[in-house]
Image (spheres, helix red, strand yellow):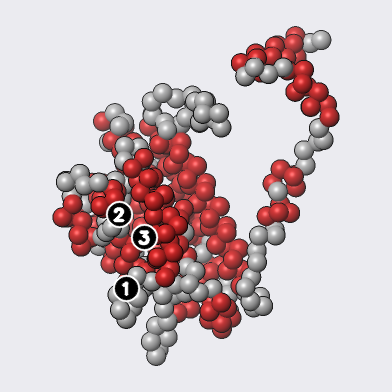
Amino acid sequence: MEKNIEDKIKLLEDKYAQMGQDINSYLDGLLLSNYLTYWDYTQVETLLTLQNPKTDYPDELIFIMYHQITELYFKLCMHEFEQLGNNGKIISESGKDEGWKSDLDSTFFVERVNRINRYFEALTKSFEIMIDGMEKEQFLKYRMALLPASGFQSAQYRMIEICSTDFINLVDKDVRSEYTGKNAPIEELFKYIYWNKGATELATGKKTLTLNQFEKKYGEKFIALAQEYQTKNIYQKYLSLPEHDRNNPKTKNALKQLDVNVNINWPLVHYKSAVRYLQQNTGDISATGGTNWQKYLPPRFQKRIFYPELWTKEEMEDWGKGWVETNVFKVEG
């Protein structure tokens, strides 16, 4: 037997011995198992059964699939947030720390933040599928079968926001100053989360069914996540870096680009889509969940900024204008 094969068998013996397992049983299982196939690994046949339109309009399939693709990209983002929050460590199903880093270094930090940026940029660039890829007449028909469901109810998007910044920056801008610097509990701040205004009835100002459903299903989970990430959201991880790494333009620009991607570009492509399908000369149509898209989507109204410390006063005042992204200085290399 070749030496390298013997060494690998010894390593396997040690691995399974640490778990109190017998390597011979696993080798028997390896002999009996079938070769892996692409379709089994990706579960593609199951994946392709997850599209279930509620009407017979053909373009509804496009609508469903693009939202599912979006959620998969969001899951990739959350995978990176978890690594950043845990300093690159992986926690196994048994609860054992399988990590390889004890401290967060700037290279790992920038690489992971830029991964998230690429995921959002891919989504933003592909949003033409939603803006121009469906017949308006079909959309205005099948959307009525989707009530009160809404893209507003994407829990992963809210989790991305929570993991990106200190929670105070997600509080409605009109009450944010009342809580700034007061170290208020997350439960209190959550009552004034900015997105509440986006899911209020246009006529009465009351919470929509869409929002009530959303809070009932995810409210406690969001609060628990915010509590967990108080000390390990991306901004806190940025502050934990040495000063020379925090001042590195690559580090700052990675964060600023994330701010632009999540809080400007992504809402604006949704706004463009809403204008395409919901704006009419006789009066705008409300979104499927009754959400107030006219006031909720434009960044200039929300002034939601993850990293206000990294922007100038002028940039924040002009938040959402087209030139902001072009003024995010990018470092080559």
**Label 2 sits on what residue type?**
Phe
Residue at coordinates 43% horizontally, 55% vertically from top-left? 218
**Label 3 sits on what residue type?**
Ile
Q: Which element is circle 1 on? A: loop
Q: Which element is circle 3 on? A: helix
Query: Looking at the image, is mark 3 or mark 1 nearer the viewer?
Result: 1
Residue at coordinates 72% horizontally, 17% vertically from top-left? 22
Mark 3 neighbour density, 10 Å: few (under 14) some (14–19) many (20 or more): many
C-alpha gap between disc 3 and disc 2: 22 Å
Residue at coordinates 39% horizontally, 45% vertically from top-left? 225
Q: Which element is circle 2 on? A: helix
Q: Name the residue under label 2.
A: 190
Residue 259 versus residue 318 in the image, above or below? above
Residue 66 versus residue 110 in the image, above or below? below
The image's mark for residue 206 is 1
Q: Name the residue under label 3.
A: 264
Q: Which of marks 3 and 2 is nearer the N terminus?
A: 2
Mark 1 neighbour density, 10 Å: few (under 14) some (14–19) many (20 or more): few
Q: Earlier in the sequence, mark 2 or mark 1?
A: 2
Q: Using the image as rendered, state which of residue 70 and residue 328 is in the foreground.
A: 70
